[in-house]
Image: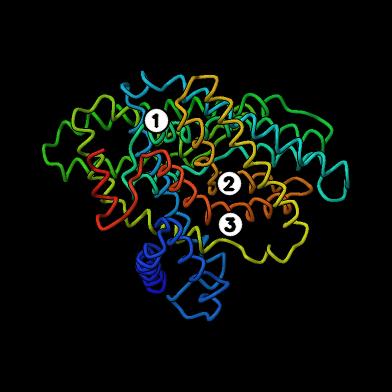
Amino acid sequence: MAAMIIGLAVALAGGLLMSRLAKKVHLPAVTAYLIAGLLLGPFFIGRFGISGIGFATLEEVANLKIVSQVALGFIAFAIGNEFRLSSLKLMGKQAVTVGILQAVITTIIVDAALLVVHFIDPALISVSSAITLGAIAAATAPAATLMVVRQYKANGPLTKLLLMVVAIDDAVGLVLFSVSFGIARALEQGSISIVSVAVEPIVEIVLSLVLGTIAGMVLNQLERFFHSNSKRISLSVAFVLLTVGISSLEFNVFGVKFGFSLLLVCMMMGTVFCNIAETSEELMDKVDGWTAPVNVLFFVLSGAELDLSILGNVLVLLLGIVYIVFRSLGKISGSWISCKMTHCSEHITKYIGITLLPQAGVALGMAITAATLSDGPIIRNVVLFSVLVYELVGPTLTKMSLMKAGEINPEGRKSSRQVNKGI
């Protein structure tokens, strides 16, 4: 226990110190946290095996999964704040169209590219793994995007649409993965289950939205008993922890698996709460400040669990490059097409695709689920390689895109954190 607490303290301090170095070269703090985690991980400092200083094994990092789950809960809760009725009236149609269409187009493009690789040499990747990776490609990491937006106080039409799209993307990605993975298993087993392909993903989404709605309404009612902001913040934190815990539960009824999506539950709770609570804006700002250390730990731990051993596998590198190139093409072209269809502004059409490139936890979760396929290890390693690339490069690309769109002011003598407050 002592070593674990010391390790978390070192991880938090290391991430914060690295962010100061990153600022010198104008890199987002998210990238700094990931690099700090990488350095503290089992491939660098962790290799020395000094108790409390670094993480000696990937299993040691995995044992701290609860920190990452809690951080994701708060991140999703904060994203729910972007779905205020005023924003939905202005951008709801655009957000839904872009969120769905870019994900579907990305899946189709990655599927096609990997199937071509299969037909060139079937030994490289199976059809089932190709279509599963195509679905995983649709997933976008909301955490990195939100942290960049927060750090630079980005604000404007692109930022508002982006935060709604990454939230919708989670639900769309869940459906695409469930359908593709169901088909992949059918190809390997010779039979298809309508329940796993069609029923289970819909049930999961509906249950998650219902649970989030109930939690948001109950949170609003209970907060009326308190007049102190500190107590209201504590209650909000308690509810996020509660929903994160409930979201981890799974159960079977008549052969149908019932479960919840942590991101969808917490996002819906945040959406409902922010639309019905009179003091929600003030409370959300204070909750964001309280959870800042948890978010730093989330990215440091994410960096520590990046498996660098996959860089020695030529097959993984080859498939990973194909996956990254065509996923990027899918996200950018899919966003461009959907933005044109909904008459988005020129800046949104041009830059939103690049901001959707980061990929992390959701994709890794899908890859773990896909481990039962014959090429399961290949899927996991390709996704790990893509996460390594996207997480280190993605935040910087997001920052650059938001700057070019005029929603982040360049950092000069004044911190962009202060300058952008008036946007």
How many marks on residues? 3
First-in-chain label (2 vs 1): 1
First-in-chain label (3 vs 2): 2
The picture quadrant where one finds residue 161 is top left
Question: Distance between the Cα atoms at labels 3 and 2?
Answer: 15 Å
Q: Position of residue 146 (x, y in %)?
A: 40, 44
The residue singled out by tag 2 in the image is 365
Measured along the vertical axis of the image, is residue 236 above or below residue 300?
above
Measured along the vertical axis of the image, is residue 118 above or below residue 97?
below
The picture quadrant where one finds residue 29 is bottom left
Q: Secondary structure at mark 1?
A: helix
User: Could you tell me the amino acid type at mark 1?
Assistant: Met
> Which quarter shows the N terminus?
bottom left
Q: Position of residue 94 (x, y in %)?
A: 47, 22
Is disc 2 in contact with disc 1, using a CB cutoff of under 8 Å? no
The residue singled out by tag 1 in the image is 268
Q: Secondary structure at mark 2?
A: helix
Q: Nearer the viewer, residue 215 or 422?
A: 422
Residue in view at x 30 percent, y 56 percent? 412
Residue in view at x 75 percent, y 45 percent? 373
Q: Position of residue 106 (x, y in %)?
A: 64, 34
| Residue 41 placement, left or right of 255 | left
Measured along the vertical axis of the image, is residue 93 above or below residue 205?
above
Mark 3 surroundings within 10 Å by alpha-carbon count, few (fewer than 14), some (14 through 19), many (20 or more): many
The dot on residue 388 is: 3
User: Could you tell me the amino acid type at mark 2?
Assistant: Gly
Measured along the vertical axis of the image, is residue 351 above or below residue 384?
above
Closer to the camera: disc 1 or disc 3?
3
